[in-house]
């Protein structure tokens, strides 16, 4: 059979019908069932998204902290770059300095902390007994039994010499805390390294989302915001260094042991907004209590007075000079940020306030003045 005959003999393909019926009426969006279905579907999507964000909230916190540290270290990298050194070499120099500081901190702080902690545990019964010699404290103890409760609790915890292990929830709790802290620190360190190395590329990529006619302006504003974050980090370092100098002088004056180690602890705590000095004051007071109750009380009062001077006199002036942020805005923004997002909010509140003020001065107010 010829090919043409085969083609002729092949049955014809069925043609799709052109009449598909009459289109029905559109859905009645005012129908309560339609509204309920759409509202329920939207609520379910929102719940799923919120749970997904909540499950990854710790990752977002680490990313925000690393990005904040990268923008804070960027001015130092830029200052080194101005001397003709490539950015990669400048980043390596900064990170080497940070790692050396961490190693120095561990080497200087850990041995005194262990020895002072042991001394405090050993002298705690004597300190509590000395408190009873004070008439006022003895009267309070007779009414509320505070000292007696502390003594019984101390004997219960230190009966087998496992104070630190008990505080962390057992041996497994200690290991879990150490591993978690180490993993978090390494994650932040690696993310910070990546962010600070690729910060110019990240800024360039973000600027490309803006219209071409406005990219130069957006890039200038972005770099100004990054500069203000760096100024905030530099200001925090200056304030923390001042606190460490004060603690060194106070330790030498009162004869506290290991003044350099105490100053290093306060230096690190001073970098934490709002609650940093609370932690530092607690540590310094506990170390002072190992000497005597009176020295502990004097140390506590002196530290509290210094913190008030720093919070209401020194910090607002430094922030106003470096960030152009009024003192009241500094305190209010730190309080609001801490109440909303905790430590991360307190860390980001002041530079965010400075960035908002910059955008208002450069964008919003000029438009209002020209209308």
Image (cartoon, grey):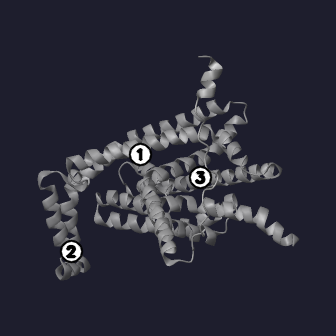
Drawn side of residue 275 relative to residue 169, left or right: right
Residue at mark 1 to residue at mark 3: CA–CA distance: 21 Å
195 or 146: which is nearer to us?
195
| Up/down of 86 relative to 75, above or below | above
Q: What secondary structure is marked by label 2?
A: helix
Residue at mark 1 to residue at mark 2: CA–CA distance: 38 Å
Residue 306 appears in the picture as rendered: no
Reading the image, the residue beneath label 3 is 233
Q: What secondary structure is marked by label 1?
A: helix
Contact check, label 3 and label 2, Cβ < 8 Å: no
Give the residue drawn at x 79%, y 69%. 365
192 or 242: which is nearer to us?
192
Reading the image, the residue beneath label 2 is 146
Mark identifier at residue 245: none
Q: Nearer the viewer, mark 1 or mark 3?
A: 1
Residue at mark 3 to residue at mark 2: CA–CA distance: 42 Å
Reading the image, the residue beneath label 1 is 184
Residue 7 in which image quadrant: top right
Give the residue drawn at x 59%, y 37%. 13
- Looking at the image, tell me whether mark 1 or mark 2 is earlier in sequence order: 2
- Looking at the image, tell me whether mark 1 or mark 3 is earlier in sequence order: 1
| Up/down of 345 relative to 199, above or below | below
Residue 222, horizontal then vertical, whole percent: 71, 52
Give the residue drawn at x 51%, y 48%. 63
Q: Residues within 10 Å of mark 1 (few under 14, many from 20)?
A: some
């Amino acid at each position: 059979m010829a090919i043409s005959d085969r083609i002729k003999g092949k049955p014809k393909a069925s043609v799709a019908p052109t009449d598909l019926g009459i289109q029905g009426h559109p859905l009645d969006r005012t129908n309560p069932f339609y509204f309920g279905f759409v509202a329920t579907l939207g609520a379910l999507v929102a719940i799923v998204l919120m749970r997904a964000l909540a499950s990854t909230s710790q990752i977002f916190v680490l990313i925000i902290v690393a990005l904040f540290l990268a923008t804070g270290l960027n001015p130092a990298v830029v200052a080194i770059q101005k001397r003709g050194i490539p950015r990669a070499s400048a980043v390596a120099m900064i990170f080497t300095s940070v790692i050396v500081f961490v190693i120095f901190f561990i080497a200087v702080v850990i041995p005194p902390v262990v020895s002072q902690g042991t001394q405090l545990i050993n002298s705690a019964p004597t300190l509590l007994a000395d408190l009873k010699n004070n008439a006022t404290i003895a009267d309070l103890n007779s009414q509320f039994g505070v000292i007696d409760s502390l003594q019984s609790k101390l004997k219960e915890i230190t009966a087998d010499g496992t104070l630190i292990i008990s505080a962390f929830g057992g041996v497994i709790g200690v290991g879990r805390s150490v591993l978690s802290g180490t993993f978090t620190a390494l994650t932040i360190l690696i993310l910070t390294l990546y962010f600070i190395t690729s910060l110019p590329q990240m800024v360039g990529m973000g600027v490309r989302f803006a219209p071409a006619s406005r990219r130069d302006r957006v890039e200038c504003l972005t770099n100004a915001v990054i500069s203000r974050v760096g100024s905030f980090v530099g200001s925090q370092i200056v304030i923390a260094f001042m606190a460490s100098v004060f603690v060194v002088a106070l330790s030498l004056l009162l004869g506290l042991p290991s003044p350099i180690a105490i100053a290093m602890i306060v230096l690190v705590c001073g970098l934490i907004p709002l609650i940093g000095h609370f932690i530092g004051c607690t540590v310094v007071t506990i170390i002072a209590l190992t000497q005597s109750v009176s020295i502990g009380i004097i140390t506590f009062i002196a530290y509290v007075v210094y913190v008030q001077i720093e919070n209401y006199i020194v910090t607002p002036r430094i922030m106003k000079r470096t960030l152009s942020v009024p003192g009241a805005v500094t305190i209010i923004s730190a309080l609001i940020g801490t109440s909303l997002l905790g430590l991360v909010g307190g860390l980001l509140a002041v530079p965010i306030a400075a960035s908002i003020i910059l955008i208002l001065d450069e964008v919003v107010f000029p438009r209002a003045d020209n209308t």
